[in-house]
Image (tube, rainbow, N blue to C red):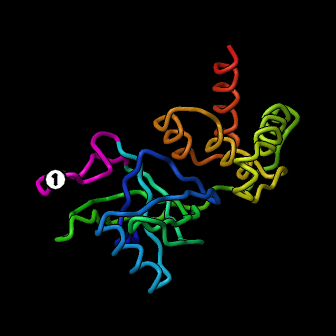
């Protein structure tokens, strides 16, 4: 029997990977309430990529966006009150999950019944991966990325593949396909193909 749990979902135009940091500015009442609830109960929420639709509800009769079926649990690691009633948070990526069903609460928050997916297997890097590691080392020298203070294990295929997938300038739908891969070396092979395409 598959074990499932109910999780508030935050549909976005971005993909979150394990260990990744996602800064968000919250202003909609449904998400302010969700963040407050998560902080009180020390629980997380799910980040899911929008397949079709919008992340902001501009009218009362707006419909929920269509989402991809695999997302990442996020936990709030930092927050600060911003101007004009905005709340700034930083969320950190945790376990991946598969969405089995969704429904909308009275406050229009999207909820999901989710099944957490197994941890990706640990894997070392080979000489073939050295060009990708070199690219990642260059990327993290960028001042904007240095500010994130990312924790990267340059000897772990999982860590290298997650950070490269989130930092490279590729379409969110491609990032989603990388998220859905279970084997880190498979993700690195796909990233190598994408890098050569970007350079071509």
Q: Residue furthest bottom?
A: 40
x, y (%) of residue 54? 29, 45
What quarter of the picture does the C terminus occupy? top right
Identify the residue shown where x is 49% and y is 72%.
Answer: 81
Give the overall secondary structure of the magenta segment.
loop
Range drawn in magenta: 51-68
Q: Residue furthest right?
A: 127
Identify the residue shown where x is 64% and y is 39%.
Answer: 187
The answer to whether residue 37 is above or below residue 111 is below
The answer to whether residue 19 is above or below residue 58 is below
In this rendering, position of residue 178 left or right of residue 140: left
Camera-nearest residue between 47 and 99? 47
Splitting the image into 4 quarters, where does residue 61 fall? bottom left
Splitting the image into 4 quarters, where does residue 2 fall? bottom left
Q: Residue furthest top?
A: 200
Secondary structure beneath label 1:
loop
x, y (%) of residue 64? 23, 52
Q: Is 79 colored magenta in this rendering? A: no
Q: How many marks?
A: 1
What quarter of the picture does the N terminus occupy? bottom left
Which residue in the protein does label 1 denote?
Answer: 59
In this rendering, position of residue 91 left or right of residue 28: right
Q: Is 58 colored magenta in this rendering? A: yes
In this rendering, position of residue 138 left or right of residue 88: right
x, y (%) of residue 4? 38, 70
Identify the residue shown where x is 32% and y is 59%.
Answer: 100
């Amino acid at each position: 029997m598959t074990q499932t749990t109910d999780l508030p979902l935050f549909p976005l135009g971005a993909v979150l990977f394990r260990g990744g940091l996602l800064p968000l500015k919250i202003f909609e009442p449904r998400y302010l309430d969700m963040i407050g609830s998560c902080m009180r109960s020390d629980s997380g929420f799910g980040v899911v990529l929008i397949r079709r639709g919008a992340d902001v509800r501009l009218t009362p009769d707006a419909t929920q966006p269509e989402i991809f079926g695999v997302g990442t649990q996020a936990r709030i690691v930092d927050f600060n009150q911003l101007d004009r009633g905005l709340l700034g948070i930083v969320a950190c990526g945790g376990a991946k999950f598969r969405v089995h069903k969704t429904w909308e609460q009275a406050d229009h928050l999207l909820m999901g019944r989710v099944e957490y997916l197994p941890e990706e297997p640990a894997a070392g890097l080979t000489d073939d991966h050295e060009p990708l590691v070199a690219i990642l080392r260059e990327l993290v020298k960028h001042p904007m990325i240095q500010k994130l203070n990312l924790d990267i294990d340059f000897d772990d295929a999982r860590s290298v593949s997650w950070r490269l997938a989130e930092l490279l300038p590729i379409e969110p739908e491609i990032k989603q396909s990388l998220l859905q891969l279970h084997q880190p070396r498979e993700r690195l092979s796909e990233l190598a193909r994408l890098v050569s395409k970007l350079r071509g």
